[in-house]
Image (cartoon, rainbow, N blue to C red):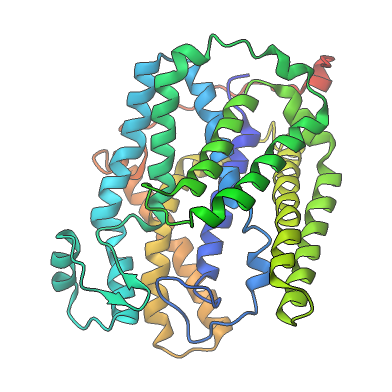
Amino acid sequence: MTRRYDLDWLRIIAFGLLIFYHTGMFYVTWGWHVKSDHASHAIEPLMRITNPWRLDLLFFISGVAIRFMAEKTGAWQLGLSRFNRLFWPIVFGMAVIVAPQSFYQVREQYGFTGDYLDFYARYLTHYRGWCDANGCLSVPTWNHLWYVVYLLAYSLVFAALWPVLKRVPMGWMKRLPAWVYIAMPFAWYCFGDYVLDPLFPQTHAFVGDWYVHYDSAGFFAMGVLAARFDRFFEIARKMRHVSLAVGFGNYLALELLRKLWAAGQIDPFAAELIGNPIETAQAVFMMLALIGYARQHLANADGPIRRTLTEAIFPFYIVHQTIIVVAAYNLNRLRMPVAIEATILIAITIAGCWLTYMVVRSIPLLRPLFGMPLKPAVAPTRPVILRESEKGLHS
């Protein structure tokens, strides 16, 4: 097996959900860079379906991917490859891509009235004058690119440790009972929620962001561990229907708990105490369901669509939030009905992401700035992939 197409599709799905999630952030009551005049609670329950697990799934897939890469190259080459793939999009993103997000944020939230050049001169010089009761906006910033920053750090640590890690015997994982594959992430989540989250609120500032590092690095490490243990993916495949039912059932239970809390029918402390394991179960089983369905239906799903989206989805991720913020801010001033406005916003976002990819892929000097190799990869010959059950191999 030369490539895991099911994980390619999972990565595409996870990034795609993230793009739609950030579009939704314009329309909910939660804090964000810009807000619609139509913002309400209407789609918040829909957003909460993916809230607990969308980024953890991405870190897990990234862990699997880097383990496969590590077995094809040396530690130094691996570290250099990850640095070149992730560092330049961070620098370019902070300097160019993310800046318009902050421009519209300071116009809407801090009353800034200057033009973009006036803003940008302050943005690049660490201006600290945009403040309100909640504190000051720190610029320059990486905003949604925090995922790339954290992934780069974890990748470089893994590359440095790989010469030692590859000598550690891991055969014992094949003998673990199936329930351990569920209990491990469940326990990991619960410790973070009960112990670390109250002590270290999420900041995405990297330094001091211990809860987010615990959560993100933990699932990155789980991906590294699971990469070469096909049994885990077979368990997820066999459990996929049950996992989906349990995950969605816990989501419904959590929504009911929120309604009881909002109505004052349950103590806030009790609601949090009960809600954390329910949310954890939602996250764990929804991820298992997605991994299982991808294993069942997408393991052999190769073709030009898969190859194009696999290359395009990271540039999509880099530019999508800026397109959303810029388009949303300006659409909001046209005072259109929400259904029309949202439809146009989604269309602009998809078209803008696609246009960016089409331009970037054709200009070699731009490719590394969007996480693409300097030269396009040659499409490999499509291999035949068999699951363990099809090969008659059972752990």
Residue 206 x/y as whole percent: 38, 47
**Height in image: 43 above or below 170?**
below
Tell me the quarter of the picture where residue 296 sits: top right
**Height in image: 324 above or below 357?**
below
Q: Which of 360 and 122 is in front in this view?
A: 122
Which residue lies at the image location 54% right of the left edge and 89% below the top edge? 337
Please give left or right for residue 238 compared with residue 85 in the image: right
Residue 284 x/y as whole percent: 71, 45
**Height in image: 57 above or below 259?**
above
**Height in image: 333 above or below 162?**
below
Please give left or right for residue 209 compared with residue 115 in the image: right
Which residue lies at the image location 45% right of the left edge and 25% below the top edge? 158
Please give left or right for residue 145 compared with residue 165 in the image: left
- Res. 268 visible in picture: yes
- Res. 303 visible in picture: no
Residue 365 x/y as whole percent: 23, 40
